[in-house]
């Protein structure tokens, strides 16, 4: 007898179910087989979502119920043969009706107990087993669905029940002794002694297969999934991951305990104890032998076999002077956690015994806090032990390999490669078996850490420096790609070391055309050819790139940008729509990088909106910032002379501007006055306390192509002479310069002593258009000081400024998973 288990990923569509039925039919011809199936791909998650929605009275549960019914009924139509269809439909309809009733019940009582949840979840496997059996019957293989609740007895620990092996093994044997058809057994589900449905933990179908295999002394238990067996790392995170032909039970345990979802950890024990070979195979590549799990690692010349990770854990730390040298602290701490059934992922204690650090799943944090604080109540009251320190958003990375224990320097290599790649390690733990080194890193650096370690230990597979650099650039979508600012963004990003333009989005009129045909290219430099080849999409197309640079009109940006952020994108916008929103940073990276902290207040789970100020505000505020810091600002009077390119193309009619000046730019004066106060305001960790300054602005459009000139008069709170002020400007730099961001000018402010400086034509391209040139500092009879500045309105004032803001946001990892690509050695 062989036990074959097919996971949800192998049966996510009727086509795949048919394919699996083909595999089963072939195997059943040669051997006696028992089959275990999971729910169809994604169904268990959907069931949980429905139960949660029903419990809070959210009607979405009805939508999910309908989706569930449609998906299974149409699968029945596709899979069951004509004779079988009526019977199959009545079986699945009975389960779907039961599901509807249960959800209705949950919505009436307004809560879903773990017990009820388990019976809701059982529907997924019960439905899939019936449909897989039907697909086999349609192929002429005698098969029947088997409800594992009649076979597996557990305790009543709903959601993660413990199995009574003895009784379950007896029942399994009794059932299979009688069975004449191929049994399609539901994975994951079981029953307690009161006949209530229980489940074996997420991913538990693997465990069901091992239980069956152990009970029936199967010749093998095969876990069929959607990848080529157990791989050296999760292939979704590490593109270079490769399949491992063999792996020891211990290695598999460690990898799966630390997140390699490919096998559910409890699966290993019954297989190992009963000496049943465990194989991991690929449904999509059935000819491939996959991974065989063996008693002792066979080694492949690499000390490290695999690297896995758990994406979201919390780090908790108990510390206090009263812990040093006092025996029993650890016992009490972990006893308190155990009593609350909290599973501890990792423990690390410094030898000073001053603190014990441990990692748990985020869902257990609150319970851990209550348990630990109660346990140490007396010590806390006397000040011997401090409040539990809780930090979230970490990942645990585990480096696993039996041969690691014989080779010195593995841990050193792991840490040095992480250091070289800018990954900060927050905690470490190594089992004394030296089978596993685990480290805790910032969640946003997980993929980078995994790839860096993988490349270091499997250097022959590491891509070439150039390949890695190209592959690791962050894909960018440009919204409003055909406009003046969109074009500047595209030109600026040519050969950018971090970002690469993958999507261009513009109005209906351009949609479907190649960018080169859709755009009227206005820049003096050539259009980047690969962008020219991209097909322009419309705004309603679903944007894929994680980073979105928006050069939209404010009216369009209003609804679109929040939607994109809600979909997980980092949106860096040059549009005015959200600049003054209380939870949106209005960023000049040299001036207020700390305002990025506002992103935590945004309502998006993963994405975020960051905005770039108005084109004239940027030059002005850059010049004001060092003066604000050194002398304090008083009143500010500003007169701008703004270039025609700021009005877009064709913008202001040329006839209006020749021999003329237009003393009005809609909304501009108000923007200058309000934005400067927000940018120079103080972020107190919650909101921006706007700067107490008064700005009066007058804005004019002049016949200059690019470059805004701003004449400023201002008062300072403390005495300053010209030299002091010029020194403040000349020595000014900010985080972009310290971090060496790709678009940061070496010097953001340049003072030019020439009496004729600055002029747009001469100075707008200072620092590649990213620096502001200031000149003509002189006394002002009314306010104290006056000067003139020039800054490039579509580079620093728009495209370049937005890109620098994007670089800053990425450097600060404000959105999970978006970090600067690792540095590559050439
Ligand atoms: P199934 O639906 O078949 O149970 P799972 O989604 O539970 O499949 O597990 C398979 C997935 O596990 C793979 O698609 C892969 O992304 C992930 N995975 C994580 N780590 C590893 C690893 N080291 N080797 C193989 N797969 C891994
Ligand atoms: N369907 C269950 C889950 O998604 C069990 C499994 O797939 O193994 O967790
Ligand atoms: Mg699984």
Image: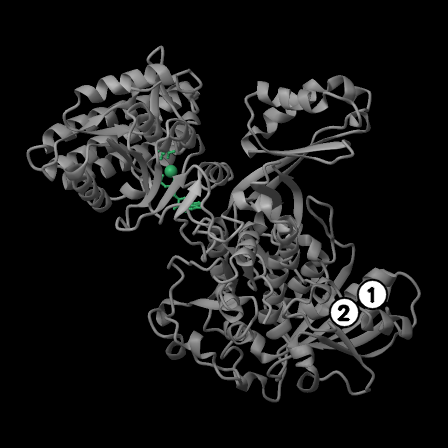
The part of the image, by quadrant, that contains residue 107 is top left
Looking at the rendering, in which quadrant would you find the N terminus?
Answer: top left
Respond yes or no on whether mark 1 lies under 8 Å from ligand 1. no
**From what the image shows, is residue 770 above or below residue 79?**
below
**From what the image shows, is residue 481 above or below residue 610?**
below
On the image, the x and y values in percent for residue 471 come to 48, 65
How was the colour assigned to the protein in this rendering? one colour
Q: Is residue 9 visible?
A: yes
Looking at the image, do the residues carrying marks 2 and 1 touch, with CB atoms under 8 Å apart?
yes
Q: Residue furthest left?
A: 83
Q: Nearer the viewer, residue 747 or 724?
A: 747
Q: Considering the numbered disc 2 on the image, is that residue within a helix, a strand or a loop? A: helix
The part of the image, by quadrant, that contains residue 7 is top left
Q: Nearer the viewer, residue 255 or 771?
A: 255
Q: Which residue is mark 1?
A: 627
Q: Tell me if 759 is positioned left or right of 90 in this view.
A: right
Circle on res. 623: 2
Q: Residue at x 37, y 27 (%)?
A: 274
On the image, the x and y values in percent for residue 197 come to 34, 19
Q: Residue at x 73, y 18 (%)?
A: 377
Q: Residue furthest top?
A: 194
Q: Residue at x 76, y 28 (%)?
A: 386
Q: Is residue 107 visible?
A: no
Separation of marks 2 and 1 at Cα, in angstroms: 7 Å
On the image, the x and y values in percent for residue 391 come to 65, 38
Q: Nearer the viewer, residue 522 or 356?
A: 356
Q: Tell me if 116 is positioned left or right of 610 in this view.
A: left
Looking at the rendering, in which quadrant would you find the C terminus?
Answer: bottom right
Q: Residue at x 50, y 75 (%)?
A: 487
């Amino acid at each position: 007898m062989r036990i074959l288990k097919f996971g949800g990923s192998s049966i996510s569509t009727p086509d795949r179910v048919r394919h699996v039925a083909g595999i089963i039919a072939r195997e059943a011809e040669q051997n006696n087989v028992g089959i275990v199936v999971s729910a169809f791909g994604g169904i268990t998650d959907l069931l949980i979502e429905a139960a949660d929605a029903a419990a809070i009275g959210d009607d979405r549960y009805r939508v999910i119920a309908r989706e569930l019914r449609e998906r299974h009924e149409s699968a029945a139509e596709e899979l069951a043969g004509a004779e079988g269809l009526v019977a199959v439909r009545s079986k699945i309809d009975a389960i779907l009706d039961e599901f509807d009733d249960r959800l209705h019940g949950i919505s009436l009582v307004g809560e879903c107990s773990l017990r009820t949840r388990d019976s809701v979840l059982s529907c997924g496997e019960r439905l899939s087993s019936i449909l897989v059996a039907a697909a086999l019957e349609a192929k002429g293989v005698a098969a029947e669905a088997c409800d594992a609740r009649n076979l597996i007895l557990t305790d009543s620990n709903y959601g993660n029940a413990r199995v009574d092996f003895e009784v379950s093994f007896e029942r399994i044997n009794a059932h299979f002794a009688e069975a004449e058809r191929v049994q399609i057994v539901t994975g994951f589900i079981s029953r307690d002694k009161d006949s209530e449905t229980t489940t074996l933990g997420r991913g538990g179908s693997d465990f069901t297969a091992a239980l069956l295999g152990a009970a029936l002394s199967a010749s093998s238990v095969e876990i069929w999934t959607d990848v080529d067996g157990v791989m050296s790392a999760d292939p979704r995170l590490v593109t270079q991951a490769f399949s491992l032909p063999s792996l020891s039970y211990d290695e598999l345990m460690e990898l799966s305990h630390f997140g390699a979802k490919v096998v559910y950890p409890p699966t290993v024990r019954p297989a190992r104890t009963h000496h049943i070979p465990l194989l991991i195979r690929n449904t999509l590549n059935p000819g491939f032998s996959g991974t065989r799990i063996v008693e002792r690692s066979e080694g492949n010349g690499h000390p490290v076999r695999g690297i896995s990770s758990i994406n979201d854990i919390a780090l908790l730390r108990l510390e206090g002077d009263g812990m040093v040298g006092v025996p029993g602290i650890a016992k009490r701490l972990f006893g308190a956690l155990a009593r609350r059934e909290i599973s501890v992922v990792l423990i690390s204690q410094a030898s000073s015994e001053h603190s014990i650090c441990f990692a748990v799943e985020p869902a257990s944090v609150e319970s851990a806090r209550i348990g630990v604080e109660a346990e140490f109540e007396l010590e806390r009251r006397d000040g011997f032990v401090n409040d539990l320190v809780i930090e979230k958003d970490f990942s645990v990375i585990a480096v696993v390999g039996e041969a690691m224990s014989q080779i010195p320097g593995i841990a050193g290599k792991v840490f040095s490669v992480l250091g070289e790649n800018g990954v900060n390690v927050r905690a470490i733990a190594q089992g004394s078996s030296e089978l596993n080194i685990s480290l805790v890193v910032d969640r946003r650096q997980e993929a980078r850490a995994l790839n860096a370690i993988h490349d270091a230990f499997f250097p022959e597979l590491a891509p070439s420096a150039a390949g890695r650099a190209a592959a690791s650039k962050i894909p960018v979508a440009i919204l409003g790609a055909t406009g003046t600012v969109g074009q500047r963004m595209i030109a600026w990003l040519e050969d950018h070391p971090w970002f690469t333009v993958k999507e261009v989005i513009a109005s209906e009129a351009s949609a479907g055309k190649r960018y080169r045909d859709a755009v009227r290219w206005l820049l003096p430099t050539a259009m980047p050819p690969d962008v020219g080849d991209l097909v322009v999409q419309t705004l309603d197309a679903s944007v894929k790139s994680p980073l979105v640079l928006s050069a939209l009109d404010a009216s369009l940006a209003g609804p679109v940008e929040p939607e994109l952020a809600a979909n997980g994108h980092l949106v860096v916008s040059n549009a005015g729509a959200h600049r003054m929103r209380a939870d949106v940073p209005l960023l000049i990276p040299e001036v207020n990088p700390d305002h990025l902290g506002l992103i935590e207040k945004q309502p998006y789970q993963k994405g975020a909106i960051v905005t770039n100020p108005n084109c004239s505000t940027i030059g002005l505020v850059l010049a004001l910032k060092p003066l604000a810091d050194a002398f304090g600002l008083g009143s500010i009077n500003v007169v701008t002379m703004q270039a025609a390119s700021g009005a877009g193309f064709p913008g202001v009619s040329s006839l209006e501007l020749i021999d003329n000046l237009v003393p009005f730019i809609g909304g501009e004066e108000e923007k200058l006055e309000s934005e400067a106060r927000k940018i120079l305001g103080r972020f107190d960790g919650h909101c921006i306390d706007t700067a107490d300054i008064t700005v009066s602005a007058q804005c004019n459009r002049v016949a200059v192509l690019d470059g805004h000139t701003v004449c400023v008069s201002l008062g300072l709170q403390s005495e300053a002479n010209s030299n002091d002020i010029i020194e403040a400007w000349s020595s000014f730099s900010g985080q972009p310069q310290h971090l060496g961001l790709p678009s940061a000018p070496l010097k953001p402010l340049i003072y030019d002593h020439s009496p004729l400086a600055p002029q747009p034509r001469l100075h707008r391209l200072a620092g590649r258009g990213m620096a502001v040139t200031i000149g003509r500092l002189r006394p002002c009879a009314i306010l104290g000081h006056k000067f003139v500045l020039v800054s490039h309105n579509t580079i620093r004032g728009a495209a370049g400024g937005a890109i620098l803001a994007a670089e800053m946001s990425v450097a600060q990892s404000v959105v999970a998973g978006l970090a600067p690509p690792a540095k590559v050695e050439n």
